[in-house]
Every structure is written in structure tokens, then in C-alpha cells.
Image (cartoon, grey):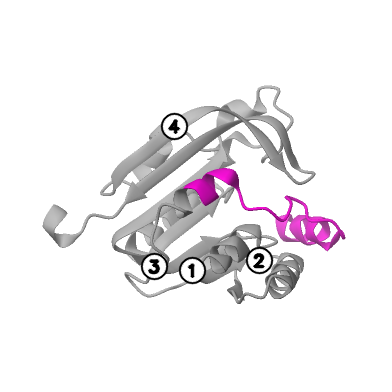
Amino acid sequence: MMQEFWNERYKQPEMAYGKEPNAFFREQLDKLQPGKLLLPAEGEGRNAVYAATIGWQVQAFDYSEAGRTKALQLADALGVTIDYTLSEAENYTSGPESYDAVALIYAHFPPAIRHKLHQQVKGWLKPGGTVMLEAFHPKQMDGYTSGGPQNHAMLYTADMLRSDFTGLKIKVLQEYEITLHEGIYHNGAGYVTRLVATKPTADQI
């Protein structure tokens, strides 16, 4: 069961993906005015804690209790507060237009769950809000050893994301090779898909 897999990974003393935020996430978040941020599938909290240190009000969720424990420990060590809920992606709920930004960083799901969550994300964003995403592309399975699901159906293409986030204004949509330095499980060359898109305001529709 995947929940047991993640609990086992996050129970280890070291941080599976390091304490530093994802580089793309940090680069994009630093361009925005701090507000309310949602981080689905947040694991050990490296991105949530970084966001909190620069003034964001952070809501995160994951179904791994071990991940949540380490995230709260990291937040405490850095003197910040994050609101971290234990929830499966398909069960998480929020009010409409609740967030200034949503970041999906290696938040890989089976197609039905992915599509539903991405539709919900669009509804949860405030007008003018931003969604940021970095995830492994199907090419990651062509000999790359830097991590990711070993299941094509859980890997994301630009076309897939363009379809999922229709109605948003796409600012970045890329598929390419990068070098990862994220803890012990995301290391070396990887093939990823990246998205940044904003929800139109009333005067832009």
C-alpha cells in the first residue's frame, strides 16, 4: 500500500528529499507577494517551511503521518508555523477562491485522482492566484535514476497539464532535463514537466 511505503520512507532519520525547498518552487514563489499557500502531498515539509519563513500563510496536506511529524519538527526548528492536515488527495476539501497560490511539487497521482485534484485546485485559487507544478515526465522512465513513480500513468506531460488547467493563463510550460540535488531520493539527471499558470481576474475574462 502506498501510504505504508511513504510512512516507511519518512520514518527514516534523514530527510528523504532534504531540508531545502525545491529549486523551481523557490524561484517561482520568490516572485509572488506572500499570501495564503496550499501544498498538496507535502511530505516532510521542506517547501511549506520555506514558504512560511518568507511570510506565507501555509496550508499543507499529505496522507503520511510520518511526513507530517517531520514537517512540524522542521517548522519548529526554524521558528515558523504551518497548518498541516492528514488527508488523502481525493478527500481534501477547501472553500472556493481560498488560496493566492497552490504548489504541486512531485505530487504524482493516478489519472482519475490527478484530474479531480487539478480541477479542484482551479476552484480553490483566488482570481489572480498562481499554480506552480514540477513533476516527472514519462521520459523519466527511459533510464533516469533520480526518482519518481515507476508507472507511466502517474507521470505528467505538458499536454496533460495544458488540458487539466484549461481556463488559466499559462506563463511557463516546459518539458526538459534538469539535475536534481534533493536529499537521497532525488539526485542526478531527471526529466521533468513544469507549469506556472494564473487564474484570470474578472477584468481578464
Q: Earlier in the sequence, mark 3 or mark 1?
A: 1
Q: Position of residue 158 (x, y in %)?
A: 42, 34
Tell whether position 12 is magenta.
yes
- Camera-near label (4 vs 2) is 4
Q: Earlier in the sequence, mark 1 or mark 4?
A: 1
Q: Position of residue 121 (x, y in %)?
A: 40, 59
Q: Position of residue 43 (x, y in %)?
A: 67, 60
Local packing at callout 2 (Cα closer than 10 Å; few below 14, some 14-19, many 20+) is many
Task: Say which quarter of the image contains residue 1.
Answer: bottom right
Q: Nearer the viewer, residue 90 or 193?
A: 193
The label on residue 56 is 1
- Camera-near label (2 vs 1) is 1
Q: Earlier in the sequence, mark 2 or mark 1?
A: 1
Q: Which residues are magenta?
A: 1-27
Local packing at callout 3 (Cα closer than 10 Å; few below 14, some 14-19, many 20+) is many
What residue is disc 4 on?
A: 174
Q: Earlier in the sequence, mark 3 or mark 4?
A: 3
What residue is disc 2 on?
A: 63
Q: Nearer the viewer, residue 151 or 136?
A: 136
- Are dots 4 and 2 in contact, CB under 8 Å? no
The label on residue 99 is 3
Local packing at callout 1 (Cα closer than 10 Å; few below 14, some 14-19, many 20+) is many
Q: Earlier in the sequence, mark 3 or mark 2?
A: 2
